């Protein structure tokens, strides 16, 4: 069994201002936290506690003030900006809140969107075929030429999931993937994330404030325990996972 | 697909998705580009075309008056000259060079008919594409544009336009034979009909043909049995004496039928017969009646609008200008000078417009910048998504830049096409 963590945060320190708290300064502090390959993890906590910020730090979108982040065996701080972007686009798949899609592209083009943004990915027939298969698997095979405006919120979220998976990443990061969905669609989206992730052996990290969603994951961590208003020290992680 | 190809793909998709926004941006930018582009090119075309024609027309001689009117009439066949000049002046002008008569008083289907001499075609480098040059009375040759517009070819017949409905004494529309079509020259000559100046005089009524006036005709045509009361002793009207337009008005107390068909005896001359306007004038020239056409009065007295003089030498040119400067009735106009004066006004106007164009360009740029800023703000989520997925700032800038470039290229192409279309129309207007 591979014991090298897919995600590792060590001695991580990052100050940020929470928009949810009127721009009040907060500090995120994680002494050591890791996610093993294939593990499915939920991050939860109150609004503004830094869940999305942590996700951005793990993805290399934000750079920590101190500490290190290791993704799939590669320490992000050792990489330049371009290499971090290449790693991100090749090894990480993202699903965001409110399933943002590019409104002028149809469903299939949205799934293939990452290929048009970075030369680390190659848009070839195999990629196109993979995108079509994913859409078919997500029940959107007959809607691949529809624009986002012509899709329901649940369908848009499924397109976003297909976009996150089409690059064959090692880690799937989802930030409030059920936000804006009705309970039925929410349930279906989580089912899909778990099933597709599990079939592909992906490490899954999902940010959620929904207890029902949290319970679907084998481990969950309260990010609120790692963050505190500026001036206070972040306490130890209080996870519910293993 | 290359990075540029991907950028082009996304930019095209984005622009097509917001058709109206894109169209307004392209249109606004195109207008800002079109205005100076067209104005400067139009001014250059105007300068080139007008000066080229003027340079090929060294001196125009006409009655004293407006130099501009004389130039426009002689070079571009536009408008009328206030007073004509006798054809007989040609002999005097021939001392200085080739003097080409230009009589632009009539039209065919709204197109000017230029009465001139056969030397005009050589002087202007005009050649026939089909048929031949006019050689006989009533024959015309059509300029290339006119022939194309009216779908004319040799053998067609055209009726001259009626110039004055109420002038019963002359200017009757006549059927004219199109005997040739000229090759296009890109000059005003393409937009005119040409005939011998005598054909133009024929339209004046100055040179005409009519049925022979005899006692028998008077009786059959006018139904007046009292021939003696109508005719003199000698009823021959074909002896070179003037026949045609009434030389005296009918007396006020003349009977109605007499006024309509009067053949009046001239009291001073026993052999003289005068016919009134009621006599049947030929409305066309045929092989049978061509020899019946005749001129009343001296050819030297017949009018032309102007003479285009091509001096034999610079010395003759200067002598002609000197001679005309002292002339009481006539003037020598150098078209180049007239056109340069006109162009000076056009160029001054163009320079004045530059400031206006700069203002339009600035406001368009501001409008463009505002639209771009608003568009980027609306697409903030899209930019954020790109950044999170793994797209660099430069790549995002390149994608936006490609969209802007597409709009600018489309606007410039539109402006250039519109400008070329405008110039083509202007060119056609200048020639026609």
Image: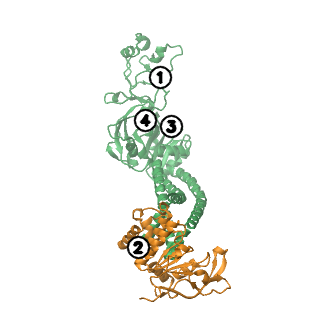
Chain colours: A orange, B green
Closest to the camera, between mark 2 and mark 4, is 2
Q: Residue at 58% across / 61% down in the picture? A: B364
Q: Where is residue A194, by image quadrant?
A: bottom left
Number of numbered labels in the structure image: 4
Label 3 crowd bin: few (<14), some (14–19), many (20+), radius 10 Å: some
Same chain check for tags 2 and 4: yes
Label 1 crowd bin: few (<14), some (14–19), many (20+), radius 10 Å: some
In whole angstroms, how far apart are the C-alphas of marks 1 and 3?
Answer: 22 Å
SS label for mark 2: loop
Q: Which mark is residue B84?
A: 3
SS label for mark 3: loop
- Residue B352 % position (x, y): 60, 57
In whole angstroms, how far apart are the C-alphas of marks 4 and 1?
Answer: 20 Å
Q: Can you see residue B78?
A: yes
In whole angstroms, how far apart are the C-alphas of marks 1 and 2?
Answer: 88 Å
Q: Is residue B137 above or below residue A210?
A: above
Sequence-earlier tag: 2 or 4: 2
Indicate the chain on which mark 2 is placed: B
Sequence-earlier tag: 1 or 2: 2
Contact check, label 1 and label 3, Cβ < 8 Å: no
- Residue B206 % position (x, y): 44, 30
The residue where tag 2 is placed is B2
The residue nearer to you, when weighing B152 against B58, is B152
Closest to the camera, between mark 1 and mark 2, is 2
SS label for mark 1: loop
In whole angstroms, how far apart are the C-alphas of marks 4 and 3?
Answer: 13 Å
Same chain check for tags 1 and 3: yes
Sequence-earlier tag: 4 or 3: 3
Sequence-earlier tag: 4 or 1: 4
The residue where tag 1 is placed is B246
Q: Which mark is residue B200?
A: 4
């Amino acid at each position: 069994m591979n014991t090298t963590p897919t995600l590792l945060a060590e001695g991580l320190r990052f100050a940020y201002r929470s928009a949810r708290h009127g721009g009040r300064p907060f500090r995120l502090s994680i002494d050591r936290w890791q996610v093993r390959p294939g593990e499915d993890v939920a991050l939860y906590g109150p609004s503004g506690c830094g869940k999305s910020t942590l996700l951005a730090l793990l993805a290399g979108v934000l750079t920590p003030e101190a500490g290190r982040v290791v993704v799939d065996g590669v320490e992000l701080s050792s990489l330049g900006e371009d290499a971090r972007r290449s790693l991100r686009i090749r090894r990480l798949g993202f699903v965001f809140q409110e399933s943002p899609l590019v409104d002028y592209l149809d469903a299939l083009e949205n799934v293939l969107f990452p290929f048009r943004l970075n030369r680390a990915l190659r848009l070839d027939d195999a990629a196109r075929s993979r995108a079509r298969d994913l859409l078919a698997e997500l029940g959107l095979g007959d809607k691949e030429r529809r624009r986002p405006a012509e899709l329901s919120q649940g369908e848009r979220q499924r397109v976003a999931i297909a976009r996150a998976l089409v690059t064959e990443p090692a880690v799937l990061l989802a930030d409030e993937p059920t936000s804006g969905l009705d309970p039925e669609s929410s349930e279906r989206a989580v089912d899909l994330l778990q099933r597709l992730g599990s079939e592909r052996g992906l490490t899954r990290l999902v940010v959620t404030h929904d207890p029902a969603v949290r319970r679907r994951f084998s481990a969950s961590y309260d990010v609120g325990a790692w963050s505190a208003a500026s001036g206070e020290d972040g306490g130890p992680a209080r996870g519910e996972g293993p | 697909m290359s990075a540029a190809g991907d950028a082009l793909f996304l930019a095209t998709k984005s622009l097509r998705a917001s058709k109206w926004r894109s169209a307004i941006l392209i249109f606004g930018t195109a207008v800002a580009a079109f205005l100076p582009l067209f104005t400067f090119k139009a001014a250059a075309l105007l300068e080139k075309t007008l000066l080229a024609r003027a340079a090929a027309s060294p001196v125009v001689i006409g009655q004293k008056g407006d130099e501009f009117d004389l130039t426009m009439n002689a070079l571009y066949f536009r408008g009328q000259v206030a007073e004509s000049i006798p054809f007989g002046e040609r002999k005097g002008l021939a001392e200085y060079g080739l003097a080409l008569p230009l009589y632009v008083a009539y039209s065919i289907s709204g197109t000017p008919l230029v009465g001139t001499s056969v030397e005009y075609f050589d002087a202007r480098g005009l050649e026939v594409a089909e048929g031949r040059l006019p050689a006989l009375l009533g024959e015309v040759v059509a300029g290339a544009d006119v022939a194309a517009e009216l779908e004319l070819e040799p053998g067609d017949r055209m009726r001259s336009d009626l110039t004055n409905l109420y002038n019963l004494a002359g200017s009757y529309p006549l059927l004219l034979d199109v005997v040739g079509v000229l090759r296009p020259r890109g000059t005003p000559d393409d937009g005119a009909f040409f005939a011998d100046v005598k054909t133009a005089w024929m339209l004046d009524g100055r040179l005409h043909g009519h049925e022979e006036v005899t006692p028998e005709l008077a009786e059959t045509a006018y139904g007046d049995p009292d021939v003696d009361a109508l005719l003199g002793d000698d009823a021959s009207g074909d002896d070179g004496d003037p026949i045609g337009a009434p030389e005296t008005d009918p007396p006020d107390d003349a009977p109605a039928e007499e006024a309509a068909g009067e053949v009046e005896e001239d009291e001073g001359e026993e052999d003289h017969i005068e016919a009134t306007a009621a006599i049947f004038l030929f409305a066309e020239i045929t092989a049978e009646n061509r020899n019946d056409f005749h001129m009343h009065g001296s050819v030297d007295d017949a009018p032309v609008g102007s003479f285009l003089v091509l001096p034999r030498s610079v010395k003759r040119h200067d002598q002609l200008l000197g001679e005309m400067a002292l002339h009481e009735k006539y003037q020598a106009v150098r078209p180049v000078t007239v056109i340069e004066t006109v162009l000076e006004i056009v160029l001054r106007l163009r320079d004045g417009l530059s400031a206006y164009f700069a203002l339009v360009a600035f406001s368009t740029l501001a409008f463009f910048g505002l639209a771009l800023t608003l568009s980027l703000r609306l697409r903030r989520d899209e930019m954020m998504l790109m950044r999170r997925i793994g797209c660099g700032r430069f790549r995002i800038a390149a994608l936006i830049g490609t969209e802007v470039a597409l709009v600018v290229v489309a606007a410039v192409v539109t402006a250039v096409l519109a400008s070329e279309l405008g110039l083509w129309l202007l060119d056609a207007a200048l020639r026609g």
